[in-house]
Amino acid sequence: MAKRKGKGPTPKAEDRHWHGKRQKARAVKSAKRTGTTTVGPRGRAASAEPQRATRPAGARRANGEVPELVTGRNPVVEALRARVPGSALYVTSGTDERVRESIQLAADRGIPLLETGKNELDRLTDGAVHQGIALQVRPYRYAHPDDLLTGTSPLIVAVDGITDPRNLGAIVRSAAAFGASGVVVPERRAAGVNAGAWKASAGTLATLPVARATNLSRQLKAYQKAGCFVAGLDAAGGVTVADLEVASGPFVLVVGSEGKGLGRLVADTCDMLVTIPMPGRAESLNAGVAAGIALYEISRLRT
């Protein structure tokens, strides 16, 4: 009896010749979507995408770790006048008066001048309007929050919900003026030290440390354990800043945003909420102004 012709038993998917390639393609696609890595041959971790050379990011992407680029003739010359720390000045031409001044200021401060073409500057600035000039700002080195516990009676300023770098810079300026040990900012959803903060601080960021806290409420509790009294600045506070006698010892002043004020968890963590009396018509103060007034009153209590 003749055998019937047929394909025989259907092989399993993993036994087919195309299975390995398909699985690898799926893994790469998944890694691209999630941002994870895939495991290559010999068990080595391989990136889902080929690695690209790191390049300076635009100002909107600066986060304290990636070099920030200040672009445009007016912003660059103003940043240099404010002594914002730069690591390189990119220029396509020096015909404009503001560009020539920027070149002179950079030369006086020892900032390298790099002549570049328009296409290259377009690439470096991610297509931002640069007007032929860009200043690369050095990444800011944040201190550790515990480093601010200096001396026998430290004065620390913590900011909660401040998203405007100019407000942060103004707070740093006031903190430096009234003898604070440093400023603490949250790591997420808050302004960091960039060119705007540098300009608003009037150079005081060069002398006063700024620390980043992963969790501000947790850090405030750590300061309390270290012996600090923590007071939050709030319009609903029951004690005025001028009457806060406990501020003469180790002290942390917490400043909230102008709109939302202190977050609930941060406010609950504070030992006390204090206020600035305002007999006038204004309902609130700018965060930088409020911090300056409060720190002035605190400095009087500490002398």
Image (spheres, helix red, strand yellow):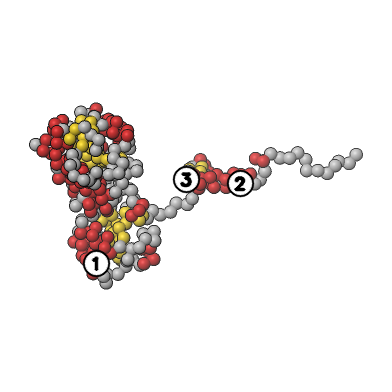
Residue at (23% x, 53% y) in the render: 199
Rounded to the nearest angstrom, the CA distance separating label 3 from label 2 is 20 Å
Name the residue carrying label 3. Answer: 35
Closer to us: 278 or 19:
278
Q: Quadrant of residue 144?
A: top left
Of callouts 2 and 1, the N-terminal one: 2
Closer to us: 108 or 164:
164
Of callouts 3 and 2, the N-terminal one: 2
Of callouts 1 and 3, the N-terminal one: 3
Is residue 212 shown above or below 230?
A: below
Name the residue carrying label 1. Answer: 98
Rounded to the nearest angstrom, the CA distance separating label 1 from label 3 is 42 Å
Does dot 3 land on a helix, a strand or a loop?
A: loop
Q: Is residue 172 visible?
A: no
Q: Which amino acid, by three-letter code, is at mark 1? A: Arg
Residue at (81% x, 43% y) in the render: 6
For label 3, the crowd category at 10 Å Cα-Cα, with few meaning under 14, some 14 to 19 and many 20 or more, is few
Q: Which amino acid, by three-letter code, is at mark 3? A: Gly
Foreground label between 1 and 3: 1
Name the residue carrying label 2. Answer: 22
In the image, taking residue 64 as reference, residue 42 lies left or right, namely right
